[in-house]
Image (spheres, helix red, strand yellow):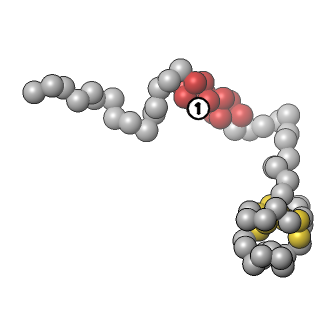
Amino acid sequence: MKSLIRKCSKCGVYTLKQMCPKCGGPTEVALPERYSPIDRFGKYRMKMMEGNSNGKNNNKPAQENQAQ
């Protein structure tokens, strides 16, 4: 079940609508996703976080620019 409560990204007003009634800005879901201890993809998410915490960026190519 998705959350009905939404928050305006511009002014911070809570509403149930897609657009803010106060400023007309877009709204986002106000609540985070539900946590489950039986997380099927948790090990993959942890591997990604461990790889990025070592200062490595997996998006960059492995080759370094060499001086010519």
Residue appearing at x 78%, y 37% in the figure: 39
Q: Residue furthest top?
A: 54
Q: Does 26 sit left or right of 65 as displayed?
A: right
Residue 31 pos. (x, y %): 85, 53
**Of helix, strand and loop, which one carries label 1?**
helix
Up-down relation of residue 33 to residue 64 (above or below): below
The answer to which of 34 and 65 lies nearer the viewer is: 65
Q: Is residue 2 visible?
A: no
Up-down relation of residue 9 to residue 38 (above or below): below
Dividing the picture into quarters, in which one does residue 26 lie? Answer: bottom right
Dividing the picture into quarters, in which one does residue 21 lie? Answer: bottom right
The quadrant of the image that shows the N terminus is bottom right
The total number of labels drawn is: 1
Residue appearing at x 73%, y 73% in the figure: 25
Looking at the rendered structure, the kind of residue marked 1 is: Met
| Mark 1 Cα shell of 10 Å, populated few (<14), some (14-19), many (≥20) | few
Q: Does 6 sit left or right of 66 as displayed?
A: right
Q: Which residue, given by chain and number where applicable, does mark 1 sit on?
A: 48
The answer to which of 49 and 23 lies nearer the viewer is: 23
Residue 43 pos. (x, y %): 68, 30
Up-down relation of residue 47 to residue 27 (above or below): above
Q: Residue furthest left?
A: 68
